[in-house]
Structure formats: C-alpha cells, structure tokens
Image (spheres, grey):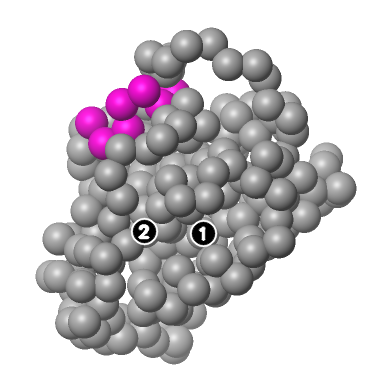
Amino acid sequence: MDAAASSPAHPAPLPVTHVLYLHGFRSSPRSFKAQRLAAHLAAHHPQVHWACPALPASPAAAWALIEATVADWPVATMGVVGSSLGGFYATRLAAVRGGRAVLINPAVDPARDLARHIGEHPVWHDPAERIFFRPEYVDELRALAVGALPEPQRVLLIAATGDEVLDWREMVARYPGSPQHIVPGSDHALSDFDAHLPVLLRHLGLD
C-alpha cells in the first residue's frame, strides 16, 4: 500500500545521474539489494554513476566517507538509497545536502538500538570478516542525528511490516510528509526487493 506525501504538488524532478547506496550494520557492498540495484542500473541506465562504498564501523568515519564520495555530485540529480543503518545516514545526507533519498527499513534511532550491540560481530556476507562496534560509536551516532527533513517529499520510505529487527511503525512516524510505500509482511532485509524496485526507480526518475 502507498501513502502519498501530504505536501503540495511539485514539478517532476529530473532523473538522477548519480546513485549512492549505503548498506546497513554488519552488511557490505555485497548486499543483495545493492547488487540487484547495481545490476539493474548497469543494464538499463548505464549512464548513471554508481557508488557503494564499504562503510566503516565508526559512524563518524562512515559519514566522512559519505561526504567525500558525494562532494562533487550535482545535488539536483543525485540520489541515495540507504538500508537499515544506511537509511539513517541517507536521512542525514538528504537533510544537510539535498537530493532524493530512498530509505529501506531505515534505523530511526540507531544510537538507542546499537547500544545493545557493543562488541565484535561477523560481517553478514563473510563470517571470517569481523567488525568491532565500540562504545564511543553510540555518541557518534547521536551526533549525526537530524530533526525534521526540510524537503520530506524528496524522501521515499519503504517499510516492511514484517521487519523482525526494527519497528516499521516508528519508521512511518519518523517521516511525515514523505511518500511511504508500506510492504505487508516481508522482512528486515526486504527479501522481495525485486517486487519493489519499480517504486524505488520511479522515485529516482528512472522508471
């Protein structure tokens, strides 16, 4: 089901020319969603510049890498897709820089949630690879939090009611005024991502 944004009508923006994908906690550029989106863009929109950096465990370092990646990107035609913790970073990018964003089961309050996960963890796509989430990273997350979005209509929320990690109702409440694509069931990884790819692409002007 879709809920339209409660904001005035806006002219259709230009298709994006640059797309940044931000993966979640313990994830990597090998994320299924990142791979599927990258493959689709390469096949159907090869002119779009794609970036999917491996984000450090430190939120401050991750944010510095994100800023460096998009430093010379055109704001009017850039888009960011963020999943879980990546959705938190994408929210900040949309707030402080602009452009369009798609948030897939985004972390609304990661400082609260990840305070319970301090310590060493395996990376999902390679259990031999480890990350260490340090206590000071919780404060770094708090420092990156932003309030209401200045242009909520530019941010699309995709939230699955079957998310077993995060509460989809918190996501809905966090993004008033944004278009919202609510997925009945599914899961935190949005395993049926392909079914919702058209909604994502439409928001980026790439349908």
Residue at image position (36%, 84%) is 131
Residue occupying the point 62% across, 55% down: 20
What secondary structure is the stretch in magenta mostly built from?
Answer: loop
**Is residue 132 depicted above or below 15 in this figure?**
below
| Residue 135 visible to the viewer | yes
Task: Kindly identify which residue carries mark 1.
Answer: 22
Please, what is the three-letter code of the amino acid marked with disc 2? Leu
Query: Where does the image place residue 153, in percent across and percent down from the top left?
Result: 47, 26
- Residue type indicated by callout 1: Leu
The residue stretch that appears in magenta: 173-179
On screen, residue 121 versus residue 74, left or right, reads: left
Left or right: residue 106 compared with residue 20: left
On the image, numbered disc 2 is attached to which residue? 85
Which residue occupies the foreground of this view, 1 or 100? 100
Q: CA distance from mark 1 to mark 2?
A: 8 Å
Magenta stretch: includes residue 98? no
Residue farthest along the top direction in this orientation: 9
Question: Which of the labelled discs sits on residue 189, or is there none?
Answer: none
Q: Secondary structure at mark 1?
A: strand
Determine whether, in the image, residue 5 is placed left or right of residue 101.
Answer: left
